[in-house]
Image (cartoon, rainbow, N blue to C red):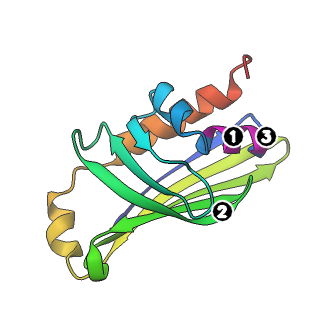
Amino acid sequence: MSFFEVRRTLLAPPERIWAILTDAQRLVEARLGVTRIDGRIEPGGRIKLWSEAAPGRAFPLKVTVWEPNRRMVWEGGMPFGLFRGVRRFELASVDGQTNFHMREDYSGPMLGMIWNSMPDLTPSFATFADGLKSLSESKTQ
C-alpha cells in the first residue's frame, strides 16, 4: 500500500464543502489536523502546509487540478521525482448529499525508504474528514 484515503458522506452541498476546502484560514481554525497554511488555495497556487501528523515540518505543495465543487489536486515532493505525494479531493453530489473522497498517493524511486519511516496517516485523514463533515453540516454556515 502506498496511499492513504478516507471517504465520508456529507449532508451538505458540494459548494459549501468546496468553500471550506479552498479557505486556508478556515482549514486551520477548524482544527482538522492542519496547523498552518501559507499561501492561497487557488488554481496553480503554491502553498506550504504544516500538520499535526508531522509537527514542525512544512510541506510545499502546488494546486495542479482545480475543478470547482468537484475536484482539486495538491502535489509535492522531492526534486527529480525522487519522492512524490499527490493528494486528491473529490466531491460527488448524490441525492442532496455529497460523497467526499480524499486520497494521497506516493511514488518515486525513494518510496520504499521513505514509506518505512512514515507514520500511519489514517487517523489524520479521519480527523480531517470528520471535521469537514461537522463543519459543512453545521447550521451556522
The quarter of the picture where residue 13 lies is top right
Q: Is residue 112 left or right of residue 85?
A: left
Most frequent secondary structure within the magenta stretch: helix
Residue 7 on image: x %, y %: 56, 49
Quadrant assignment for the C terminus: top right
> What residue is at 25 percent from the left and 79 percent from the top?
82
Separation (CA) of disc 1 from disc 3: 10 Å
Separation (CA) of disc 2 from disc 3: 18 Å
**Circle 1 crowding by C-alpha within 10 Å: few under 14, some 14–19, many from 20:** some
Label 3 near label 2: C-beta < 8 Å?
no
**Circle 3 crowding by C-alpha within 10 Å: few under 14, some 14–19, many from 20:** many
User: Magenta residues?
Assistant: 15-20
**In the depicted structure, whether residue 135 falls above or below residue 84:** above
Residue that label 1 marks:
19
> What residue is at 33 percent from the left and 43 percent from the top?
50
The three-letter code of the residue at mark 2 reads Trp
> What residue is at 79 percent from the left and 50 percent from the top?
93
Residue that label 3 marks:
13
**Circle 2 crowding by C-alpha within 10 Å: few under 14, some 14–19, many from 20:** some
The three-letter code of the residue at mark 1 reads Ala
**Foreground disc of the pair 2, 3:** 2
The quarter of the picture where residue 80 lies is bottom left
The three-letter code of the residue at mark 3 reads Pro
Residue 26 on image: x %, y %: 55, 31
Disc on the earlier residue, 1 or 2: 1
Disc on the earlier residue, 1 or 3: 3
